[in-house]
Image (tube, helix red, strand yellow):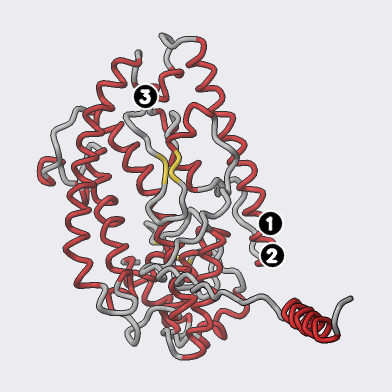
Amino acid sequence: MISRAFKASMIAAFSTALIAADEPPPVIIVPTAPEPPASEYPQDPPPPAPDYPEPPAFIADRVINKGYIYDGFDLGELEYLRGYFPDASEEERAQYAELKAWFKRCDEEGTARLNAQMAQYGVTLIEGEFSGAASMCQQVVFGNQGLLDRFETYEEFAKAARVARLVFDGLIEGLEIAEGNEAALHFREILGEIDYFSMRYHVLLYAQFWARAKGYGGRPLSTDRPPKMTADERFVFGAFLESELVRLQFARTQWLEEIVSIHGWPNEANSTRAGAGNALLMAAQGDHDPAFQVRMLRLMEREVKTGGLEGWEFAGAYDGVMLKLTGKQLYGTHFTCGEEKSALEKLEDPDRIGELRKEMGLEPIEDYLDYIRYECGN
């Protein structure tokens, strides 16, 4: 028989066990892993979607498109053009045909896109004068301007291309050194980079005379001290230059559009006098992208109203661009000198020319016509 004392001790022990079972288990605290240090440099944004059709496979590895300002198409020594020549294989001829078809598609798609943009802006381009082909497409040399017709065999062409490439690479290397030296000077001002981005472009424009029979101002090439090249080598060198100029045109106008969205149109308050002038040149020389030019003109027009840009500067830039795009000018700032009679270029709104010129602070049209006659000598 179990005693009363034993029962009491068992109940007490069992109760203690039940209480312990109801208590939550002990929590073991594990230290949280420290956050990784933030990157010293911001991550680059993903590259933009290509604005051109997918290139043929045999040139796809030449495309450099990561969203940076110096991306483009690697021409190599133009060996991808072998399919043009009669000694090419069937495969190489098929590749060249594919290249031409790709560019045609790029031109058609880009031009349709450009015309749609211009319709939104209310601007009708001169028919057949402008291609909307993307920068990457326009950089690809495929035998335009009679380049390949000069050569009977691929070996002749390749020999000229090798020399032209050496000269071109030397020019670019020298430019990169000069740009590195100049960068520290120009980047002190907010928009000083405009001078920096203009230097390469203007040097390359001058170097185009190396590809011609005459130098700057019609002088013989000997006075401009160009590299020694044969006529064929100069012609191929011109193709390398043209491709780089196209790449640079798109790169610097893209940069300008991005920078003015932050700082406004360049003027002497936020840039240098040279920088402000170079910005106007960038817009005026941006024929590769008429939609860009129209957007810049609209931005400049707002700057005139707020005092950031002189009216005469805008009027001259506007007329220069619109004459190229549409064949007409608004403010009557451009004229031609004829042997017997000089005249203004075609006006968009001749009935309002006096009013429009007054808005931009220009002299009356009658006084300007007198100036034209004096300037042209008639």
- Label 2: state its secondary structure: helix
The mark lying in front, picked from 1 and 3, is: 3
Residue type at tag 3: Glu
Measured as percent of width and height from the top left, residue 114 is found at: 62, 54
- Would residue 232 be found to the left or right of residue 305 on screen? left
| Neighbours of disc 3 within 10 Å: few (<14), some (14-19), many (20+) | few
- Would residue 341 be found to the left or right of residue 358 on screen? left
Q: Which label was assigned to residue 116?
A: 1
> For the residues marked 2 and 1, what is the alpha-carbon distance in whole angstroms?
7 Å
For label 3, the residue is: 79
Measured as percent of width and height from the top left, residue 369 is found at: 43, 75
Residue type at tag 1: Ala
| Neighbours of disc 1 within 10 Å: few (<14), some (14-19), many (20+) | few
From this viewpoint, is residue 317 visible? yes
Q: Residue, x 42% and y 64% (percent of image)?
A: 255
Q: Quadrant of residue 63?
A: top left
Mark before the other along the chain sequence, 2 or 3: 3
